[in-house]
Image (spheres, rainbow, N blue to C red):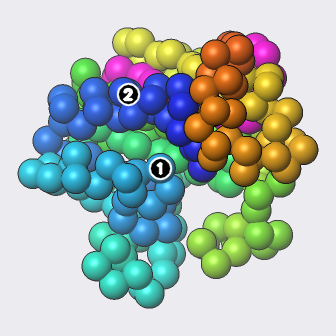
Amino acid sequence: MLQGGKPEALFAAHLQALIAGATRILDVGTSERFAKELRPYEAWFEGKDYVAAGYQPATTFGAYNCDRHEDIEAMTFADAAFDGVICLEVLEHVRQPFKAAAELGRVLRPGGRLLLTVPFLAQYHGKGSTTQGHEGYPDFWRFTHEGLQALFEDYQRVEVFALDGPIEFRLKQLYLTRWLGLAPVRRLVDAIDRPRAGKATTRHLVVGVR
């Protein structure tokens, strides 16, 4: 999860741009509606046709249950069905990421926006299962910025950002992330850390225009 500061500000800015230019938005590969980084920004989706699609999603979240089951490698939506597509921490769990990336592009209208995150230098975070459901799933891949550019090279525009830099990366590797919750530490890390594609980062953010 993002822990404030510049990484969260970067994510929020691109999320806001996607929402502002969209009427119908797909959140694919999620466990529930407005999961992960989206929950603090739920109000931003008011008035939008937001569709949450998970793979064999659980039905124990009440009002936050996913709207439907979808396989990201073979979705049932029509071509160009969405103005915006959000995909957070999903591609590392699918067997065929190029096929999944092609499906994301297929359901996104020309000129529509993609917002996607994946881990890079991060620990295993699957559940040790060979199935793809949310109750148990594998963790197959890590993506460099160049690999992500290759996945989405047919977009009009694609940018890949390192969400955190070498300092925050090392704090996370040493299980010291709780210190980022302290405002002085967060400000110091933001001031001296330098997130850059091609350098140490735990996560990449992909922003594309179809």
In percent of width and height, residue 183 lies at 59, 38
Q: Earlier in the sequence, mark 1 or mark 2?
A: 2
Question: What span is in magenta?
Answer: 198-210
Answer with the quarter of the image where residue 80 lies: top left
CA–CA distance between discs 1 and 2? Answer: 12 Å
Crowding near pointer 1: few (<14 within 10 Å), some, many (20+)? Answer: some
Answer with the quarter of the image where residue 187 lies: top right
Asked whether disc 1 touches disc 2, contact meaning CB atoms under 8 Å apart, the reply is no
In percent of width and height, residue 180 lies at 67, 41
Q: Residue at x 35, y 20 (%)?
A: 209
Residue type, numbered disc 1: Glu
Look at the image and say whether residue 209 sits in the magenta stretch. yes
Q: Nearer the viewer, residue 5 or 86?
A: 5
- Callout 2: SS: helix
Residue type, numbered disc 2: His
Q: Nearer the viewer, residue 81 or 142?
A: 142
Q: Residue at x 45, y 61 (%)?
A: 35
**In the rendered image of this protein, does residue 116 appear above or below residue 208?**
below
Residue 166 visible, this orientation: yes
Residue on which disc 1 sits: 37
190 sits left or right of 138 in the view: left
Q: Residue furthest front?
A: 184
Residue 195 visible, this orientation: no
Give the label on residue 102, or none: none
Crowding near pointer 2: few (<14 within 10 Å), some, many (20+)? Answer: some
**In the rendered image of this protein, does residue 152 appear above or below residue 135?**
above
In percent of width and height, residue 47 lies at 9, 51
Which quarter of the rendered picture does the C terminus lie within?
top left
Q: Residue furthest left?
A: 47
Look at the image and say whether residue 112 sits in the magenta stretch. no
Give the label on residue 14, or none: 2
